[in-house]
Amino acid sequence: MHALVEQATEHWVYLAPLLSDPHSEAEYDARVEALDEILDLVGDDETHPLVGLANRLGDIIESYDEAHRPMPEVSGSEVLRYLMQEHGIAQSELPEVGAQSVVSEVLSGRRKLNWRQICELSERFGIATDSFKEPREKLRVLT
């Protein structure tokens, strides 16, 4: 038997629970806890031997989240409103969007965020630009 396969065989009983898809909240929580421990060990060292395991475990957790905890579809203005509440920001404190009147129009739905505003807000709050993506409008089927 090849040495690598032999080593994998010896240690598989310990790795299999981490690398299998969770089928319950308890299994999911165990994967998240394991990932947190691994990330604490790895730190900022991208050459650490456990980086690959951390990446795979992250993929497993993300897959479970997408299947069991779908994100609600919200508008860019709803995301902005949430961020403002979370960070205690007034309409007049968003130069990334514009004047207070522009922020008010965005929050009321009379105006949509443009690409420049989205990029600047994403940078300010450290979130992906996709967070401000407008939900797909349901297509009407004409009969």
Image (cartoon, grey):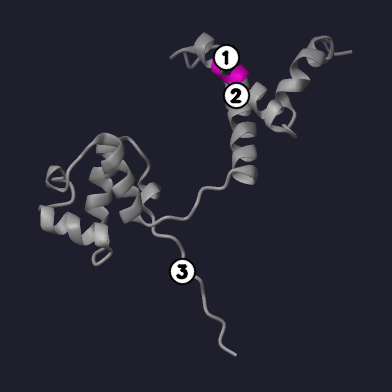
Q: Which residue is mark 3?
A: 137
Q: CA distance from mark 2 to mark 1?
A: 10 Å
Q: Earlier in the sequence, mark 3 or mark 2?
A: 2
- Could you tell me which residue is drawn at 48 percent across and 17 percent down? 46
Q: Whole-percent x and y of residue 55?
A: 58, 26
Q: Main secondary structure of the magenta part?
A: helix
Residue 64 picture location, percent across and down: 64, 38
- Kindly report which numbered mark, 1 or 3, lies closer to the viewer in this rendering: 3
Q: Residue at x 18, y 51 (%)?
A: 97
Above-or-below relation of 28 to 127: above
Residue indicated by mark 1: 38
User: What's the distance in space between the residues labelled 3 and 2, CA to CA?
Assistant: 34 Å
In the rendered image of this protein, does residue 60 appear above or below residue 90? above
x, y percentage for residue 63?
63, 39
> Could you tell me how far apart the alpha carbons at marks 1 and 3 are, in whole angstroms?
41 Å
| Residue plotted at (71% across, 22% down) | 18
Q: Is residue 8 visible?
A: no
Region in magenta = 33-38
The type of residue carrying mark 1 is Ile
Q: Please, which residue is most extreme toward the right here?
A: 1
Residue beneath label 2, please?
32
Tell me the element at label 3.
loop
Q: Residue at x 73, y 33 (%)?
A: 24
Residue 56 falls in which quadrant of the image? top right
Residue 42 x %, y %? 51, 12
Residue 140 at least partly seen? yes
Residue type at numbered disc 2: Val
**Picture quadrant where residue 75 is located:** bottom left
